[in-house]
Image: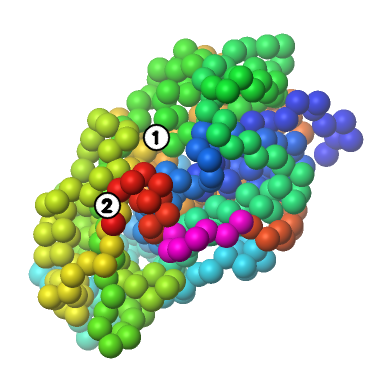
C-alpha cells in the first residue's frame, strides 16, 4: 500500500448493516472513511426490522452477483463475528416437504446447494432438507459492532447527516447535508437503502428505482418456558418463499414475513390483516403456535429494486459515486461480501486499498430492549 494515502476520505452514505460493513471494511483495509447517516442512530431502517437470519446461500441462484457475495461473506464473517462478540445462534434450518411437488423442490434445492458448495442433508425419515449452516443473529448488534470497530480503526461517523446535494469537484465529490455540513471526499458509496435512488438522483443518475417491500413479523412466547431450537423454512413455491418461523436470541419465536409492495417509503405500520395472513401459515410450520396471541409485531421496508437487484457499481453520471443499492433481504447475510467487493473497486479511482486487517475490537453502543422493537418504536409503529 502507498505511504501517501489520499487527503480526502471516502464517504459511506447510509448507516444500515451494509453501510456499517462498508465502513468497517474500508477502515480495516487502510482507507480513511466517514459514514453519513440521516437518522440519529445507526440501523434504524431495514437493518433493524428483518429476521436476523444469516443465510448460507443454499437456495441462491448460481452465477448471480448476489450469490457470489453471500458466499464471499460466509468466508469472511465468522471470524469477525467471533472477534467482535456479536451474538449468534447456530440453529440450523429445516424445510419439511408435504406434497410430491415439495419433495421435488427439496431435491432441486439440495442440488442447488451442492452447486454453491453449501453443505445440506436430506433426512431419510421425511425427506426434509437440513441446512446446518443457517443461523440467527442480532442485526442491530452486528451493525453497532462493525461501526464501533471501524471507529476504533480510525473511521468517523456523522449522525443526523442527511445528504441533500452532491457535486463534482477536482478528483472527488462535495457532499452537503441538510444542516449545512460539507464534506470533500475522494469517492462516495451510496448505501442509503430505501433512499439510494434519491441519493443517485442528486448526481443526475436515474438509472435505477427503489420501492419499499413491506415485511411484517409477529413475535410469540411459547408456553412453559419452551424455546425453538431451529429455523423452520417453508418449502418455496414459484410464487413465494413463504413464512419463516425462527428463534430469537432472547428466547422468543418470530413468524414472518409478508411481502407487500408499496410506494410509500414512510409506511412502517403493521396492517390489521397481516396477523391472520401470517398466523395461518406459521401454525402449519410450528403447531405449538396454535392459539397463541402475538406479544409484539413489527414491519420492515426492504429496499427492492424495480426490475433490478444488487445494483453495485460506479454511477453512470460520475465514476466517484458508487451505488450499492437494491440490496434486498439478503443484505444482512451478504454485507461483508458486498463491502469487500466494493472496496476492490476503489483502486480504479486511484484510492489505495490494502488487505483486510484483523478486527479492531471496541465496545459498541448498547441498544435498549430487544432489537426487533427498536426501529418499530422509533417509527411509532404499533407493537
Query: Above or below — where is 167 with respect to 190?
Result: above
193 relative to 177 in the view: left or right: left
Start-end of magenta stretch: 365-371
81 relative to 379 in the view: left or right: right
From the image, tell me which residue sits under label 2: 382
Task: For label 2, count other residues whose C-alpha is less than 10 Å away and answer few (under 14), some (14-19) or many (20+).
Answer: some
Question: Label 2, label 1: how many angstroms apart (C-alpha)?
Answer: 21 Å
Is 308 in front, or is 193? 193
- In terms of image quadrants, where is residue 255? bottom left
Say if mark 2 contacts mark 1, CB within 8 Å. Answer: no
Q: Residue furthest right?
A: 3
The percent coordinates of residue 206 (x first, y second) are 40, 17
From the image, tell me which residue sits under label 1: 194
Residue positioned 22% across, 60% down in the render: 243
Residue 366 on the magenta span: yes
Is 344 in front, or is 295? 295
Instruction: Determine whether the residue tagged by mark 2 lies in a helix, strand or loop.
Output: loop
Amino acid at each position: 500500500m502507498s505511504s501517501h494515502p489520499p487527503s480526502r476520505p471516502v464517504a459511506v452514505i447510509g448507516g444500515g448493516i451494509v453501510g456499517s460493513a462498508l465502513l468497517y471494511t474500508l477502515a480495516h483495509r487502510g482507507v480513511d472513511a466517514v459514514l453519513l447517516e440521516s437518522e440519529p442512530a445507526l440501523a434504524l431502517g431495514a437493518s433493524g426490522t428483518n429476521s436476523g437470519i444469516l443465510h448460507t446461500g443454499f437456495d441462491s441462484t448460481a452465477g448471480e452477483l448476489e450469490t457470489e457475495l453471500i458466499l464471499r461473506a460466509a468466508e469472511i464473517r465468522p471470524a469477525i463475528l467471533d472477534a467482535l462478540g456479536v451474538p449468534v445462534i447456530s440453529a440450523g434450518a429445516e424445510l419439511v416437504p408435504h406434497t410430491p411437488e415439495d419433495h421435488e423442490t427439496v431435491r432441486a434445492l439440495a442440488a442447488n446447494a451442492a452447486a454453491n458448495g453449501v453443505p445440506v442433508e436430506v433426512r431419510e425419515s421425511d425427506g426434509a432438507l437440513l441446512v446446518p449452516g443457517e443461523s440467527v443473529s442480532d442485526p442491530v448488534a452486528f451493525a453497532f459492532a462493525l461501526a464501533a470497530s471501524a471507529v476504533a480503526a480510525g473511521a468517523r461517523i456523522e449522525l443526523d447527516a442527511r445528504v441533500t446535494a452532491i457535486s463534482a469537484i477536482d478528483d472527488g465529490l462535495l457532499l452537503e447535508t441538510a444542516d449545512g455540513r460539507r464534506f470533500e471526499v475522494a469517492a462516495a458509496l451510496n448505501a442509503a437503502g430505501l433512499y439510494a435512488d434519491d441519493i443517485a438522483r442528486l448526481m443526475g443518475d436515474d438509472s435505477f428505482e427503489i420501492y419499499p417491500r413491506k415485511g411484517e413479523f409477529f413475535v410469540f412466547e411459547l408456553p412453559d418456558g419452551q424455546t425453538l431450537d431451529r429455523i423452520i423454512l417453508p418449502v418455496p413455491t414459484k410464487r413465494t418463499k413463504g413464512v419463516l418461523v425462527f428463534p430469537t436470541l432472547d428466547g422468543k419465536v418470530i413468524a414472518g414475513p409478508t411481502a407487500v409492495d408499496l410506494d410509500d417509503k414512510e409506511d412502517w405500520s403493521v396492517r390489521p390483516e397481516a396477523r391472520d395472513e401470517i398466523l395461518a401459515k406459521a401454525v402449519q410450520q410450528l403447531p405449538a403456535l396454535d392459539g397463541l396471541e402475538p406479544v409484539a409485531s413489527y414491519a420492515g421496508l426492504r429496499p427492492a429494486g424495480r426490475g433490478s437487484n444488487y445494483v453495485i457499481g460506479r454511477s453512470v453520471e460520475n465514476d466517484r459515486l458508487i451505488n450499492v443499492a437494491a440490496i434486498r433481504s439478503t443484505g444482512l447475510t451478504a454485507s461483508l461480501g458486498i463491502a469487500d467487493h466494493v472496496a476492490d473497486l476503489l483502486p480504479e479511482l486511484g484510492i489505495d486499498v490494502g488487505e483486510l486487517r484483523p478486527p479492531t475490537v471496541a465496545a459498541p453502543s448498547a441498544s435498549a430492549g430487544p432489537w426487533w422493537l427498536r426501529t418499530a418504536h422509533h417509527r411509532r409503529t404499533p407493537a
